[in-house]
Amino acid sequence: MSTPDHDHGAPGGPGTTEPARGPGVGDHDHAAHAGHDHGGGSHAGHSHGVAADADRRYLTAALVLIGAFIVVEVTVGILASSLALITDAGHMVTDAFAIGLALVAMRLAARPARGRWTYGFKRAEILSAQVNGITFLVLAVWFTYEAVRRLITPPDVEGGLVIVTAAVGIVINVIAAWLISKANRSSLNVEGAYQHILNDLWAFIATLVSGIVVLTTGFARADAIASLVVAALMLKSGIALVGESWRIFLEAAPTGVDPDAVGADLASVEGVTEIHDLHIWTITSGFPALSAHVLVEPGDDCHRVRDRLQERLRERYSITHTTLQVDHADPTVLSIGATRGHCEDPHGAVHTP
């Protein structure tokens, strides 16, 4: 640039009192981190990810409860020759694994950002959710195979043992689901553990029904049919968890947020002549982020325009962690809408008023 750049940080930072330059002066790079401008720079009342201390108690209690019941269920399943009970026990092992993984991910996510880890380990919870989803899918395939095999050659099933164990399992899972529901379910990690418990609850209900059918009618294939119901539920939850975690890993826009609509809305803010290089993504659950290159009218105040954009993003889209590069538009940009003078390799659509 022909004149020195002036870096105007977030409100309250260095350079905020310098007035905006008028037309004909070189570009100004105004980088704003809206996510760090909460009431004069404070982060009060603003958190990203999981409230680990509050949630660990609930998850740990659910883990202990489920771990104790797994031992009982496997033993009874073997004695009763019930695939449905063994399937449920296998599902509960994944419940315990999911909760344990969630607890580890919470500890990692709570670590402060330092060094090369500029966001800390906040995405550990997304990795945990993805592992949970993949576990669902693998077990669904295995349980489907075993259920089909038992439909062809059904073993003798002790319906009475199945009914009692399934009834106890329902009580255990209701308590565990209640405990986890009190945690922060906006976290994809906690939601993954919750879905494990909820699926297991439905599985026990299906197993209870199959045990009643076997005991009253002698129809042994009901046990295998109940296993197929469990596998279908696991498949559904697995696809949802894997799909959402992949959206986050691939930096897709948050669910329900249309980047083109956001760009058009920002371009309509007074003083804005163009929005480009707009990126919206999710760092971890409940932590959306946005960056954009903003061109404003040559005579306008860049800080005032940036504040308007931050306010709109906060109020309409609940996006508070933003990086906005704000420049005065060159006359050529105003006349032909070209961005080449500002960005050598502009990304995405260009939004104008």
Image (cartoon, rainbow, N blue to C red):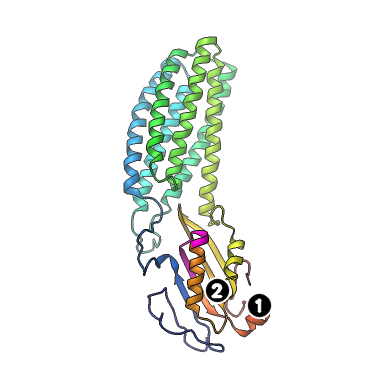
**Could you tell which of marks 2 and 1 lies nearer the N-terminus?**
2
Q: Which type of secondary structure does the marked residue at label 2 adopt?
A: strand
Horizontal side of 117 relative to 221 (left or right) equals left
Q: For the residue carrying disc 1, how many other residues have a C-alpha within 10 Å: few (<14), some (14-19), or many (20+)?
A: some
Labelled disc at residue 109 = none
Against 4, is 140 above or below?
above
Question: Where is mark 2, residue-wise?
Answer: 294
| Residue 345 appears in the figure | no
The label number, if any, that marks residue 337 in the structure image: 1
**Residue at the location (56% across, 78% down)?**
296
In reply to whether residue 207 is colored magenta, the answer given is no
Q: Which residues are magenta?
A: 315-323
Judge from the rendering whether residue 96 lies leftward or rightward of residue 296; answer left or right: left
The C terminus: image quadrant:
bottom right
Asked whether the viewer can see residue 43, the reply is yes
Instruction: Report the front residue among 320 and 222.
Output: 320
Badge 2, how many Cα within 10 Å: few under 14, some, many 20+?
Answer: many
Q: Which of 52 and 256 lies nearest the eye of the viewer?
A: 256
Looking at the rendered structure, the secondary structure element under dot 1 is: loop
Return the x and y of residue 318 as percentages of the image width and height: 48, 59
Residue at position x 37%, y 40% in the image: 100
Q: Amino acid at mark 1?
A: Gly
The amino acid type of the residue labelled 2 equals Val
